[in-house]
Image: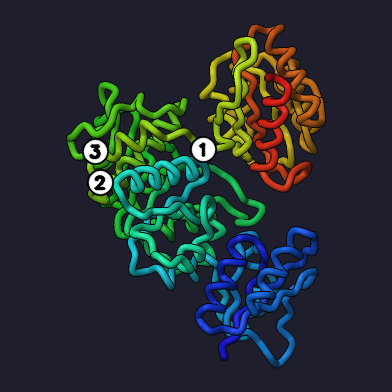
Amino acid sequence: MSIGHIIGLGRSGNAAARLLKREGWQVTVSDRNNNPNLQQQAEQLINEGIDVKLGYSLELDDSKLPNLIVVSPGVPWDAAILVRARELGIEAIGEMELAWRHLRNIPWVAITGTNGKTTTTALIAAIFQAAGFNAPACGNIGFAACELALAETLPDWVIAEISSYQIESSASVAPRIGIWTTFTPDHLSRHKTLENYFNIKAHLLMQSETQIFNGNDPYLQHNAPKLFTNAYWTNVKGKAELINGKGAYIEDGWVIFAEKKVVQVNALKMVGDHNKQNLLMAVAAACLAGIEKDAIALAIDNFPGVPHRLEYICTWQGIDFINDSKATNYDAAEVGLNAVSAPAILIAGGEAKAGDDTGWMSMIKAKTAAVLLIGDAANAFAKRFDEIGYNNYEIVETMERAIPKAAELAKQNQAKVVLLSPACASFDQYKSFEERGDRFRQICQSTFK
């Protein structure tokens, strides 16, 4: 019997374990952590005949070595255990790769990029579903990819948001349509260099039958055309700016693809030029899949937006409270701030990431009446504000203090928006950016009834 070892007991790890078990493998799942939530998951898997080891890190020094190791996205691809596995001739893959091996006969739309992935993925899934397809979103949002392979009814299309971590460990994934939303420095603590990070993303597009690029992204504009000579491009500025002359663009308030009006731009209720870019990429994918424009228009008209990404929460005394917790780097936070009305009160901070904060700092000076700083990055951000001569900040440390203070400052400064857009990871105070955004929502809704 083949032996499979799954590293990581998250949603993707659980799905991978169940898929291998169904295929007749002897399966063990390990996780170096051990908490009540993991214990509950472990009990379920054990009841299904899957071995689980909590508080355990895999070692490859006994005689009963696995034939296959499947890793969750959080496990670095150059981790010592995976390097050792390759030396021993043990195949190591990601959960996305395992799913692909079971779903490769179904067409995939794969979306990658530094920012914009989630909104674009959700939009595409909504459009395909409005057209009558069983087309669930998976990967970084929605289902784990292996959950789709486990389903009684297989999907018509797989709509997959794929991060650089997942691409690294999923070499053979070859989508029908590949989309690259944006490219800015991120995850460099893991990928080391910008060139390496770019090449990882480019691999997925190289594998794709058809490629769509965001033509308003400066880095992609400059670096992708020489690698992808037959790609489709998008541009919010019109046809004249379209690279290669083929793709989707905006003209007279309409999204145009293949010289035909598809949908009015204002049908999308999400604010900001970046969401117009996301809309163009989603429409291009739908048109290339042969979806009729009525289904596209219906889906976009009903699309509510994505939680934690410029998500409207409530209005209190004329002040809108907006949750942009998914803005976990400087570029995403700059985009978020650019999308709202000035002057705004900004709540920022958390676990800082490496990157260039210049554009974000300029946007703060231009658009905010005040910034409230939370989390581990508060002191470092305060120092940066001092360096650029921005004095309208206060360290409040926690979300619980930030929100009432933000409301008070908004009234004083006649600001119309309080925006949580942290420019940081969440792990100093929260388990995830979702938990951070949920806390923002809870406090706002209980405070401003």
Q: CA distance from mark 2 to mark 1?
A: 22 Å
Dot 2: few (<14), some (14–19), or many (≥20) neighbours within 10 Å?
Answer: some
User: Does the CB distance between marks 3 and 1 fall below 8 Å?
Assistant: no
Amino acid type at mark 3: Lys
User: Does the CB distance between marks 2 and 1 fall below 8 Å?
Assistant: no
User: Does the CB distance between marks 3 and 2 fall below 8 Å?
Assistant: yes
Q: Quadrant of the C terminus?
A: top right
Q: CA distance from mark 3 to mark 2?
A: 7 Å
Amino acid type at mark 2: Ile
Q: Residue at x 25, y 30 (%)?
A: 240
Q: Residue at x 70, y 92 (%)?
A: 63
Residue 54 percent coordinates (x, y): 77, 70
Looking at the rendered structure, the secondary structure element under dot 1 is loop
Looking at the rendered structure, the secondary structure element under dot 3 is helix
For residue 195, say whether it is visible.
no
Nearest the camera: 166 or 196? 166
Counting every numbered tag in the picture gives: 3
Q: Which residue is mark 3?
A: 293
Amino acid type at mark 1: Val
Apparent side of residue 445 relative to residue 401 in the rendered image (left or right): left
Q: Residue at x 62, y 22 (%)?
A: 321
Q: Residue at x 72, y 18 (%)?
A: 406
Placement of 350 over or under 340, stated as above or below:
below
Q: Which residue is mark 1?
A: 306
User: Tag on residue 291?
Assistant: 2
Nearest the camera: 396 or 41? 41
Looking at the rendered structure, the secondary structure element under dot 2 is loop
Residue 190 percent coordinates (x, y): 64, 56
Residue 260 percent coordinates (x, y): 18, 34
For residue 81, say whether it is visible.
yes
Dot 3: few (<14), some (14–19), or many (≥20) neighbours within 10 Å?
Answer: some
Placement of 246 over or under 96, stated as above or below:
above
